[in-house]
């Protein structure tokens, strides 16, 4: 099976980098799936989206992303987020509190954090 190089980067740090077989991200044009050999494109990530990367080891790397861009080139895929959190780093209790916030942006981001962490109940 073909592989592609993928980088998941937030402004403050590199979250994940490696070889993958698929990337799924939410863009302003809708959810998009990227497989090796995909045509080049540039997409704007939604605020409060989730990115899923399937590694060559068949593991899934999941992150809540808040704004940014997805770039697909012949060299691979780059997810360049304004901010992002890997699923295992998310404080679920805090995200549940933030979902009840009066701030719409905080609610949107908290909802994405809960989805990424697998807590949609």
Image (cartoon, rainbow, N blue to C red):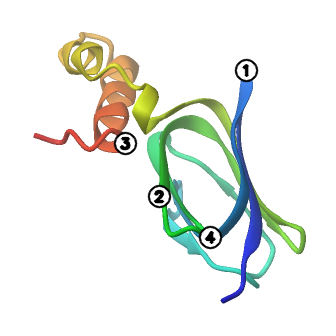
Q: Residues within 10 Å of mark 1 (few under 14, many from 20)?
A: few
Instruction: Tell me how far mark 3 sits from mark 4, CA to CA.
Output: 20 Å
Quarter of the figure with the C terminus:
top left
Percent x, y of residue 39:
77, 81
Q: Secondary structure at mark 4?
A: loop
Instruction: Tell me how far mark 1 sits from mark 2, CA to CA.
Output: 22 Å
Q: Which residue is mark 2?
A: 60
Q: Is residue 31 above or below residue 15?
A: below
Q: Residues within 10 Å of mark 2 (few under 14, many from 20)?
A: some
Give yes or no for contact between labels 3 and 4 (Cβ–Cβ under 8 Å).
Answer: no
Q: Which residue is mark 4?
A: 56
Q: Is residue 113 above or below residue 75?
A: above
Q: Nearer the viewer, mark 3 or mark 2?
A: 2
Q: Residue at x 54, y 72 (%)?
A: 33
Marking on residue 12: 1
Percent x, y of residue 28:
53, 54
């Amino acid at each position: 099976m073909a592989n592609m190089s993928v980088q998941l980067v937030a402004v403050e740090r590199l979250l994940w980098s490696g070889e993958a077989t698929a990337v799924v991200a939410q863009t302003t044009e809708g959810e998009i799936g990227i497989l090796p050999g995909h045509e080049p494109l540039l997409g704007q990530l939604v605020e409060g989206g989730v990115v899923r990367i399937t590694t060559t080891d068949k593991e899934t790397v999941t992150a809540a992303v808040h704004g940014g861009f997805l770039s697909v080139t012949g060299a691979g895929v780059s997810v360049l987020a304004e901010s992002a959190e890997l699923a295992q780093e998310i404080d679920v209790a805090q995200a549940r509190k933030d979902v009840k916030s009066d701030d719409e942006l905080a609610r949107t981001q908290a909802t994405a954090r809960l989805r990424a962490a697998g807590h949609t109940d």
